[in-house]
Amino acid sequence: MDKQAHIVVHGKVQGVWYRASTQKVARSLGLKGWVRNLPSGEVEILAQGEEDRLKQLIEWCHEGPPAAEVTKVEVEWEEVGRPFSDFEVRRDIF
């Protein structure tokens, strides 16, 4: 049964290829969902998939790509909402 994780990553995580790297890692793990920058400087991720694979993504989030400086990772486990067909980078405008 699939699970859903809502993740917010704090630190120097924008402008360091965090979103593109997250997409690559998530797709390699077979996860679906999205990643986006928040106007406050964090990166937000909503990921769906097998719990063990979600935990691997969360573990990766603590490091991120080489130029990232992660200070905190917040995770909330949620009921699976609308299922996604891919893992995309969102470029929302706030």
Image: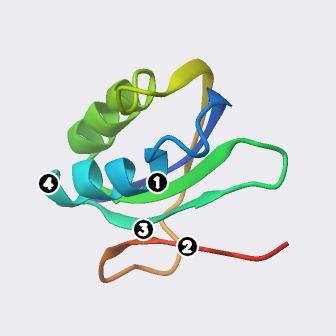
Among the two numbered marks 3 and 4 on one chain, the one whose residue lies closer to the N terminus: 4
**Marks 4 and 1: which is nearer the front?**
1
**Marks 1 and 3: which is nearer the front?**
1
**Residue type for callout 1:** Arg
Among the two numbered marks 4 and 2 on one chain, the one whose residue lies closer to the N terminus: 4
Above or below, 59 against 82 in this view is above
Marks 1 and 3, how far apart at CA: 12 Å
Q: Nearer the viewer, residue 55 or 21?
A: 21
Marks 2 and 1, how far apart at CA: 9 Å
Label 3 Cα crowd, 10 Å radius (few <14 / some 14-19 / many 20+)? many
**Residue type for callout 2:** Arg
Among the two numbered marks 2 and 1 on one chain, the one whose residue lies closer to the N terminus: 1
Marks 3 and 4, how far apart at CA: 13 Å
Label 1: which secondary element: helix
Can you identify the residue that label 3 sits on? 33
Can you identify the residue that label 1 sits on? 19
Marks 3 and 2, how far apart at CA: 10 Å
Residue 74 disc label = none
Can you identify the residue that label 4 sits on? 28
Label 4 Cα crowd, 10 Å radius (few <14 / some 14-19 / many 20+)? few
Label 3: which secondary element: strand
